[in-house]
Structure formats: C-alpha cells, structure tokens
Amino acid sequence: MFTLSWLLIIAIIAGVLGVIDGIRRARGRGTSVLAIVEIIVAALFLLSLFIPGVPFGSLTLAIVLLIVLVVAMIVGRLNVTIAVVALVLIALWIVLNLHWITIAGVN
C-alpha cells in the first residue's frame, strides 16, 4: 500500500503532464527522439512512485525528467504551457523530496 500525500499528488501530476507533453511533441513537428525519451522517463518516474523495483529510483528519474523538459522546451517551440507546468511541479517535488524546504503537512 501507499500513503496518499501532497508530495505524491504533486509527483503524479508532474509525471502525467510529462507523458502528455511527450505525446504532444511526438505527434507534432519536431524531434521525435526527444519526445520518446520524455515519454519513457516520465512513465518510469510514475512507475517508480508505486513500484519499488524500478531502476534508478524516483529521485534520479525526476532529475532526468527535469533535464529532458528543459531541453525539450529549448529545442521545440511548440505549445510550452504543459512543459512549463510540468517543469515547475517536478522542480517543486525535487526540492520538497530532498527536504531543502520543509512545509508542514506536505513533507
């Protein structure tokens, strides 16, 4: 079982938005290799939240997803709204997960 918390909800929303952004980039014009990498990393990140046996762990996959989102925003100039929201949420999750900022009730 898993405990439903604000940190988990932030991670789920960020991962789902990463998958959606990757799918939109793969369907549109642009670099499809980067979109496929984004889909794979975001899906593995979502799986790592619930399945403990996923390689690399959720923190490493979150950092990789953050890097892929930044590169995708720089390279592809499609609709970047979903990418920006996913980028902010994944950065917030990383900061809260590493306890760099402590908010009562969140972490």
Image: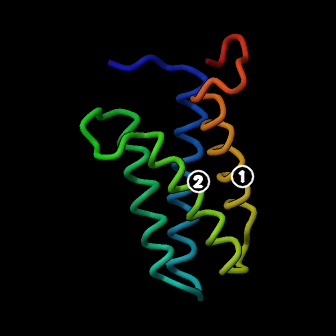
For the residues bearing labels 2 and 1, Cβ distance under 8 angstroms: yes
Residue at the farthest top position: 104
In front: 67, or 82? Answer: 67
For the point 69% across and 71% down, the residue is 73
Residue at the farthest bottom position: 29
**Dot 1 amino acid type:** Val
Instruction: Determine the CA span between mark 2 and mark 1.
Output: 8 Å
Residue 75 horizontal/vertical position (percent): 66, 80
In front: 95, or 24? Answer: 95
**Dot 2 amino acid type:** Leu
Q: Secondary structure at mark 2?
A: helix
Q: Quadrant of residue 105?
A: top right
For the point 73% across and 68% down, the residue is 80
For the point 52% across and 39% down, the residue is 12
Q: Quadrant of residue 13?
A: top right
State left or right for residue 4 relative to residue 17.
left
Residue under pointer 2: 17
Indicate whether 14 appears above or below 107: below
Q: Quadrant of residue 36?
A: bottom left
